Amino acid sequence: MPELIPVLKEEEIEESIASVARQISSDYKGRPVVLVGVLKGAFIFLSDLARRLSIPVQIDFVRAASYGAGATSSGKIELTKEIDVDITGKDVLVVEDIVDSGLTLAYLLDYLKKFKPETVRVCTLLDKHERRQSQVKVDYACHTIEKGFLVGYGLDYDEAYRELPAIYHLKFQ
Ligand code: IMP
Ligand code: MG
């Protein structure tokens, strides 16, 4: 059995989300924003973030599947759920659980830009620098992590651990 090593407590996550939400609310100055959550990992983060924002939002989701099993992204990405909300001319904020290589995000940004939104920014719960390959710009990050495979608060390993309220490093013996 892999070991779960605590990395971020519930209260730390809550505080960082509140602070990022204040920043976003102030940056958009009351303008409405379309939050585009990346399923499945971002579902808990998006629901907590949305409730902390003081600007009007619309909420949508995309689902990005990356081929290849295991703990790393293969770079070959496919969307298995596209957006429903019309984002043309709107301000879009992509809500991710974790940016690692950046390949998923780069693919998503290209996809969203085809709909000609006014702006597209990125908000991630975790900005992990371990395998960054694509120089995508992360506009808002709640926490920066150097390395390790993380689970909990929406993040999974093989669909397990998403329900944990805190974030752990999953250590394989
Ligand atoms: P990227 O394309 O390498 O940036 O990876 C992005 C996706 O890989 C994330 O949205 C997650 O679904 C998954 N991922 C990357 N690192 C982790 C991790 O440490 N724990 C859980 N999922 C991860
Ligand atoms: Mg994800």
Image (cartoon, rainbow, N blue to C red):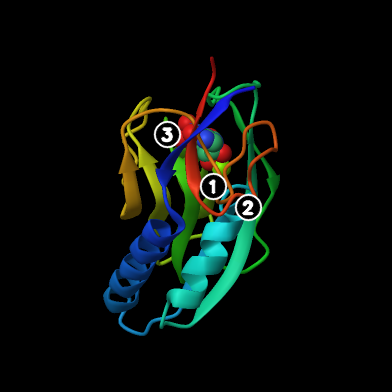
Quick one: 164 or 105, which is closer to the camera?
164
Q: Quadrant of the N terminus?
A: top right
Ligand 1 under 8 Å from disc 3 Cβ: yes
At 38% from the left and 82% from the top, the residue drawn is 31
Ligand 2 under 8 Å from disc 2 Cβ: no
Could you tell me if residue 35 is visible in this image? yes
Ranked by sequence position, the earlier of labels 1 and 3 is 3
Residue tagged 1? 111
Judge left or right: residue 158 versus residue 34: right
- Evaluate if marks 2 and 3 touch, with contact meaning CB atoms under 8 Å apart: no
Task: Indicate the amino acid at tag 1.
Answer: Tyr
Residue 51 drawn at (x, y percent): 50, 76
Q: Label 2: how many residues lie within 10 Å, few (<14), some (14-19) or many (20+)? A: some
Ranked by sequence position, the earlier of labels 1 and 2 is 2
- Please give the label number shown on residue 100: 3
- Evaluate if marks 1 and 2 touch, with contact meaning CB atoms under 8 Å apart: yes
Residue tagged 2? 62
At 54% from the left and 47% from the top, the residue drawn is 111
